[in-house]
Image (tube, rainbow, N blue to C red):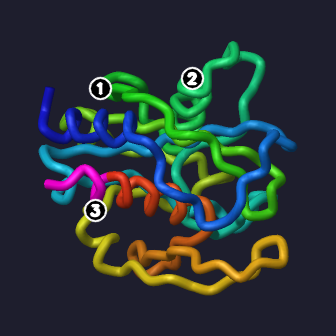
Amino acid sequence: MSPLHHMLKRIQEMESPGFPFEIPKQRQGPQAAVLVLFSGESFLQAEMLLMKRSSTVITHPDQIAFPGGGVEDRDQGSLIETALRETQEEVGLGREGIMPIGLLPELPTVSGGVWVTPVVAYASEKARRSILKLDSSEVAHSDWDLISNLLSTRKEESRSVRGVSVNLPEFQWKGERMWGMTALIFDLILQRYARIGK
């Protein structure tokens, strides 16, 4: 097991830090899962896979996101299966060399319309070097980027969520604004990492 794989397991198992806004006690919308995929030897020198959604998709056009989507019957109730299937469909990255580590707690979108479960996973070097084959109807661009690059761009924006003003994280990915659920998930992972210590 690589140092990164070990660290991701510790991050996944850690008690979650506080969320920026109140989470409803009961799920009130459909389920989705996203694959938060890392590759490398250590966390801060690792790379993470991201994509830019196409301008023609109905939900969240042109936004930076993790591969993922809604749960379907063929996933047989497995959120890991949902995340892996969606990743293969959206960016053409097959399952070989991808090692799911576990789930983070499900989170509601800011609107509360969808509940998203992040699936943390580790990619082998061979999987990292695979050529991505994008579904152009859903994905405009996809690539890996260093955690350290993303971390250096972090800032916060003040937004009103259900009538309450909260500070939400955002990052820059290849000159594009990464915000919303994607930024929240990444920031929660960073908080867990910081609490573990070096």
Tell me the SS state at disc 3: helix
Checking the image for residue 61, the label placed there is none
Checking the image for residue 81, the label placed there is 2
Disc 2 versus disc 1: nearer the observer: 2
Other-residue count near label 2 (Cα within 10 Å), few / some / many at <14 / 14–19 / ≥20: some
Picture coordinates of residue 23, whole percent (x, y): 72, 54
- Is 55 in front, or is 36? 36
Instruction: Give the image quarter of residue 15.
Output: top left
Which residue bears the numbered disc 3? 147
- Is 119 in front, or is 163? 163
- Is 40 in front, or is 189? 189
Furthest residue in direction top, as rendered: 76
The CA span between labels 1 and 3 is 20 Å
Instruction: Give the image quarter of residue 153.
Output: bottom left
- Magenta highlight on residue 197: yes
Instruction: Give the image quarter of residue 132.
Output: top left
Which residue bears the numbered disc 1? 97
Identify residue type, mark 3: Ile
- Magenta highlight on residue 47: no
Other-residue count near label 3 (Cα within 10 Å), few / some / many at <14 / 14–19 / ≥20: some
As displayed, is residue 126 above or below residue 131?
above
Q: Which residues are magenta?
A: 193-198
Identify residue type, mark 2: Glu
As displayed, is residue 77 above or below residue 179?
above
The residue located at (13%, 33%) in the rendering is 2
Mark nearer the N terminus (1 vs 3): 1
Tell me the SS state at disc 1: loop
